[in-house]
């Protein structure tokens, strides 16, 4: 089984226990959509959100495709404290790092996938909409 936290980007460390593997991106300014939550809000209210469908918009900072039959996306929106600024999302949609998108999926807490990979908070089976593609690389 391939590790969903393997990093294709140099300078990032593999995660354990669902900790963010990505450095906090600076200067993220996301225009949140009506009815959406922030990453800070999801982590702060995770117990009450468990099992709920929620919507969030943010910047795709990492993608690992086709692991355990899903694409694994790391999202940041400029909110959240140390260790709680990067939300892992599973989806069937293909996305590129640098895209801004809206995700709607089910929040799970204390999710354990085995082999030492568990997440304090994860959004699963998200549908993706309103995708703003990554800027072309120069």
Image: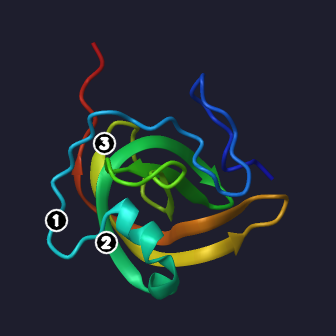
Q: Which of marks 3 and 2 is nearer the N terminus?
A: 2
Residue contact between numbered discs 3 and 2, judged by CB atoms under 8 Å = no
- In terms of depth relative to the viewer, which is nearer, 60 or 39? 39
Is there CB contact under 8 Å for labels 3 and 1? no
As displayed, is residue 74 above or below residue 9?
below
Name the residue rendered at 55%, 54% in the picture: 72
Horizontal side, residue 133 vs residue 95: left or right:
left
The residue beneath circle 3 is 99
For marks 2 and 1 on the same chain, the one whose residue lies earlier in the sequence = 1
Q: Is residue 101 left or right of residue 85?
A: left
Front disc: 3 or 1: 1
Q: Residue at x 20, y 76 (%)?
A: 35
In percent of the image, x 40 and y 37: which residue is there? 97
Residue 35 higher or lower than 13, as above or below: below
**Residue 42, percent from left and from top:** 41, 70
Task: Give left or right: position of 132 versus 91.
Answer: left
Disc 1, SS? loop
The relative height of residue 94 versus residue 119 in the rendered view (above or below) is above
Find residue 40 and report its image quarter: bottom left
Q: Do the residues labelled 2 and 1 touch (CB within 8 Å)?
A: yes
Report how far apart the C-alphas of labels 3 and 1 lie in the structure.
16 Å
Residue 33: assigned label: 1
| Sooner in the amino-acid sequence: mark 3 or mark 1 | 1
Determine crowd level at label 1: few under 14, some 14-19, many 20+ residues with C-alpha closer than 10 A: few
Local secondary structure at mark 2: strand
Q: Which of 86 and 41 is in front in this view?
A: 41
Badge 3 crowding class, 10 Å Cα cut-off, few under 14, some 14 to 19, many 20 or more, is some
Front tag of 3 and 2: 2
The residue beneath circle 2 is 55
In this rendered view, identify the residue nearer to me: 92 or 45: 45
Query: What residue lies at 25% left-to-right and 40% top-to-bottom?
Result: 133
């Amino acid at each position: 089984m391939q590790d969903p936290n393997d990093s294709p980007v140099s300078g990032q460390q593999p995660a354990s226990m669902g900790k963010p593997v990505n450095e906090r991106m600076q200067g993220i300014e996301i225009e949140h959509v009506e009815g959406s939550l922030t990453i800070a809000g999801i982590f702060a209210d995770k117990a009450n959100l468990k099992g709920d469908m929620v919507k969030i918009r943010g910047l795709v900072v990492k993608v690992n495709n086709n692991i355990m039959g899903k694409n694994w996306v790391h999202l940041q929106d400029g909110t959240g404290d140390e260790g709680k600024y990067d939300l892992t999302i599973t989806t069937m949609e293909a996305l590129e790092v640098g895209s801004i998108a809206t995700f709607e999926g089910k929040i799970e807490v204390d999710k354990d996938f085995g082999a030492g990979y568990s997440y304090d908070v994860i959004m699963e089976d998200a549908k993706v909409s309103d995708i703003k593609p990554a800027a072309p690389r120069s």
